[in-house]
Amino acid sequence: FFSPFCLRARVRPSPMQWGTRAVSAANIGLRNHLLHQYQKFSIIPNNIVSHHQKLFTSAMKSRPKSPSASPLASPSSLSPMRRVGGPASMHAMSSSKAAQNHEVPFKMALCQLSVSEDKQENIRMMEKAVSEAAANGAKMIVLPEMWNCPYSNESFPIYAEDIDAGDSPSAAAMSNLASSLSVYVIGGSIPENNDEGKLFNTCCVYGPDGALLGKHRKAHLFDIDIPGSITFKESDTLTKGGALTVVDTEYGKVGIGICYDIRFPEMATVYANRGAQMIVYPGAFNITTGPLHWQLLTQARAVDNLLHVATCSPARDTSDGAKYTAWGHSSVVGPFAEVMAEAGHGQEIVYADIDFKKNDTRRKNLPLQSQKRNDLYELKDCRNAIGFKF
């Protein structure tokens, strides 16, 4: 069979090459999947695909039956190859181990961390918390927004790291932990810079092999003005992200948002439509909006879409010189808006046992998807050119 890279080749394989080079059922199955892709991009005509389909069927019928024979996937059971942004976007693919099975429950941990002005100390505290969570059985571990630096416009440029260039001690530490502990690390967020001089509020997600599964840049920036309470404009230093992000895990798809993203229900619904079983929002709500909106929004996003939602905040800094005071109260909420776990306002790790079968049950109880009035309203999924695709 031929590599997908022949999509860019000037000389294309002939129909005879496509139709007659099958030497085993396994090769035919994989070639059949590639044929589907090439047909999708109009590389080969339908009659060649039809001829190859016949070869595949014939091979399946003649395939010797053996208890140890590995199953052969038909083309209809194989998902299309994904295309992601270019090298600069670093939206890596999930590994082949991430065969989704939301029948398997797992333990999730939210690490509500205290943040100081010492980046190395913040990294050390993060490593300690993630290691503790993994030792207690957590398979998916979430960090808070801006866990490696104080939450301030003055701090973001100073603490920013170039993830794409590999110049990121924070990203390296998260990847190493994910690999050494065989866990998923949803890396809260850190300030990211790039070669264009832009700054982003960025969440990296790592798989159990340490690979980068996805990178979400905060899509909605935190620009608010509540006289007498709080005024903050992330847009003074940060740039909006250009894509939505869903990552594959062995338990199911997980959508990623950051803090202010949770206020936009359209984004959550797009994630649900893309098959997300859970949305994770690292966030640092303040003590003005936190008591009023944090839990309300978490429960609303969950029950709107009948899925799980997890939020992870930094611990509250109550010192006199605190530049920003986070609300805390990291939590996991189930598909019926039930609070499954909740932290207080200090540094701590909270755990929740997650079973995505609950989503299926609640979607049968409330079949909202089939009851929507698409003749009256419609939500468009733009699927940006930059971002993690599927």
Image (cartoon, helix red, strand yellow):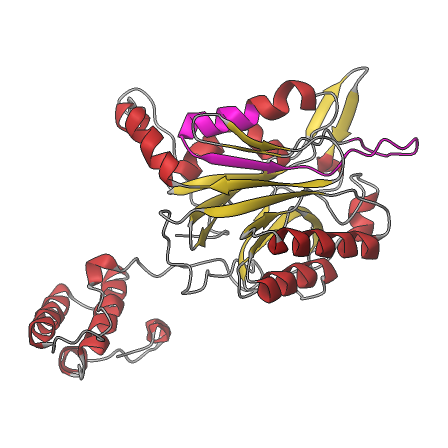
Against 254, is 342 above or below? above
The region drawn magenta spans 297-325
Residue at image point 28% right, 62% down: 41
Q: Position of residue 103 (x, y in %)?
A: 35, 47
Residue at image point 37% right, 42% down: 275
Against 141, is 84 above or below? below
Against 117, is 206 above or below? below
* Front residue of 125 and 350: 350
**Marker count (numbered):** 0
* Front residue of 310 and 9: 310
Dividing the picture into quadrants, the one containing residue 233 is top right
Dividing the picture into quadrants, the one containing residue 111 is top right
Q: Position of residue 220 (x, y in %)?
A: 60, 35
Quarter placement of the N terminus:
bottom left
* Front residue of 253 and 136: 136
Q: Position of residue 262 (x, y in %)?
A: 56, 31
| Residue 257 is at least partly visible in this image | no
Residue at image point 82% right, 34% down: 317
Residue 26 appears left or right of 388? left
Q: Position of residue 289 (x, y in %)?
A: 69, 21
- The answer to whether residue 238 is magenta is no
- The answer to whether residue 324 is magenta is yes
Residue farthest toward the top in the current orientation of the protein:
228
| Residue 388 is at least partly visible in this image | yes
* Front residue of 351 and 20: 351
Residue farthest toward the front in the current orientation of the protein:
136
